[in-house]
Amino acid sequence: MRKFALIAVPYSWLLALFLIPFLIVFKISLSDIALAIPPYTPTIKDGFGALIKGLDFENFVFLTTDDLYYKAYLSSLKIALISTLLTLLVGYPMAYAMARAPDEWRATLMMLVILPFWTSFLIRVYAWIGILSNEGLLNQFLLWTGLISEPLTILNTNYAVYIGIVYTYLPFMILPIYATLERLDDSLIEAAEDLGCSRLSAFWLVTIPLSKTGIIAGCFLVFIPALGEFVIPSLLGGSGTLMIGKVLFEEFFNNRDWPVASAVAVILLLILIVPIVLFQRNQQKQAEAET
Amino acid sequence: MNTTVFAPWDSPTEKPLIRFQNVTKRFGDFVAIDNLTQDIYEKEFFALLGPSGCGKTTMMRMLAGFETVTEGSIELAGRDIAAVPPNQRAVNMMFQSYALFPHLSVYENIAFGLKRDKLPKDKIDARVSEMLKLTRLEKFARRKPHQISGGQRQRVALARSLAKGPKLLLLDEPLGALDKKLRQDTQFELMDIQETTGTTFVIVTHDQEEAMTVASRVAVMDEGRIIQVATPGGIYEAPDSVYVADFIGDVNIIKGTAKAVNKDQYFVDWGINQAPILATSERSFSDGQECHLAIRPEKISITKDKPEEAENAVQGKVLDIAYLGNLSTYHVEMPGGQIIKAQTANTRRLSRRDITWEDPVWIRWNATAGVLLAE
């Protein structure tokens, strides 16, 4: 009985905060747009029979007819993939340096990684506008050093989106990798060197494979939210930056087309299920390896 | 029958495999190794024995190349190895934690070093099979390290470090993680493998029993110095300092002053109203010089009646009896208050033993039983 109560807590949480909202969104995606409040039909007021009859997959069919949507999905995947890779390239050396730092430094370094969370995410993204704009800090600095003679256009391009995503999600990459590297036994590296490895090959053959679970966890923690990212592309990206989060926002607030926006959201979720399942499996494997 | 004893250290023509020459190692202000000079010969099983922090592990890590020498030089086969990085030394190490690669199978762990030498695949296969056979691990080749027992892991670590056929194998507390029974079996296995492969082994341990069992020579270390190097028998029977006598095994130390009797024979005055103890010694002492007589408990016998014609016999009272099953150690209090331990083998059943607590007893030993030490 106690066991049941214990399991019931997370499950009712999931039910209330994930499954029920999802079912509502799914229901709206099957409805039609209407000039009413709420802006779709049918609703529960029409009676259950009429409600069921009024639902169809029209909106999903619509998504396939307009190539804006699949282009947005593909472009989101591309941006999420590239920025995940960039985050890994920046984050791994940082995690490695943290794990190798003297013990008394580690807590401070960890603090510095987490510190940005103390400021609102939105404010930090706005701060990047100040840095990246044509008259921004970065351009002024580069002009001052004489490296460039004309300001670089970074803001409102995909580059700014990459910078924004890498910056925002860096801690999610660093922390799981740091956790695996910190546990790594130094004598394993010594053993590899003792058996004929150079420093570099010991890193490739021992350190990287043994931090694999951390790398995978970090990549998913960056990739999954980056795929549906809305704030960063709309603030830092330009008109050419096509991301599904932005499309969704526009459908919902600008066009007030809730059914199509819901259909976009349902497809996005279906796309995300694949990496989420893979991520879960990785976590499980890690847990098994530790026991 | 071939009766040559393996003792290259006694032969002046033999060239040592390893030469420590005036080696000093400092970590900041801390002196880990203090001006140490020592030769180790080929095919030796050399044990570094000492309490933790005595510098034995530092010595081993300098041989492996993980620590640099502050002063002095270390030669391996006549060549100074200071500039040789660990991955190019013909030295392999078995780590205390075994340091097996958890993501690789037993087979891949053993093959790891061979693959780094870019050997052809069939040669690697043959060598790994040979190692698996030597350590009786054929059945476990495909398992991962976490799927085998501690004893098997220890053997994998040994096989991996032997696979490249090093000139010198370093073993850092190799049996520390095993339980006592397994440790004893493994000690003999180690000796067998050392003999079969003919590799020079240097073992670091704080377990004196282990050092005595496996080693051809034992170096007792303390505070960055080697106090004494000798065969296990030599260390036990002829320690050259009170520190070594006290560190290895159980010992009675009787403090007194020496007085020459005959050639190599001394009387030791050790207490008021006590007959002086007769002891032989190859070291010479001047009359009245302070000396310490070290006698192992098993060399002292205990009787209820006064022994006849004993070279040394003292009466005392049984204070404590430590029953160890096969042996019993009696703590006998002397009239002056000093306690001397005497050990006997329990050849009779417990109920037939006739000495018990508070009994007045006689203990006796021969003049040659102990070692007379200056300090």
Image (tube, coloured by chain):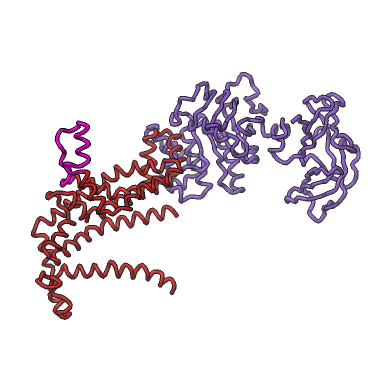
Chain colours: A red, B purple
Location of residue A135 with respect to B89 vertically, above or below: below
- Residue at image x 48%, y 37%? B161
x and y, in percent, of residue A47 in the image? 16, 81
Q: Position of residue B110 (x, y in %)?
A: 44, 40
Q: Which residues are magenta?
A: A132-158
Q: Which is nearer the eye, A121 or A21? A: A121
**Is the residue B43 above or below the residue B52 in the image?**
above
Q: Quadrant of the N terminus of chain B?
A: top right
Residue B280 point in image, percent of width and height: 82, 29
Q: Nearer the viewer, residue B366 or A247?
A: A247
The residue located at (48%, 29%) in the rendering is B90
Quadrant of the rendering where the C terminus of chain B is positioned: top right
B85 on left or right of A251: right
Q: Is residue A213 visible?
A: no
* Residue in view at x 67 percent, y 34 percent: B232
In the depicted structure, whether residue A90 falls above or below residue A77: above
Quarter of the image for residue A45 reads: bottom left
Q: Nearer the viewer, residue B66 or B122?
A: B66
Measuring from the top left, give residue A139's x and y in whole percent: 19, 38
B235 relative to B340 in the view: left or right: left
Magenta stretch containing residue A138, yes or no? Answer: yes
Q: Which residue is the extreme one toward the top?
A: B13
Question: Visible in this render: residue B202?
Answer: yes
Q: Residue at x 80, y 43 (%)?
A: B340
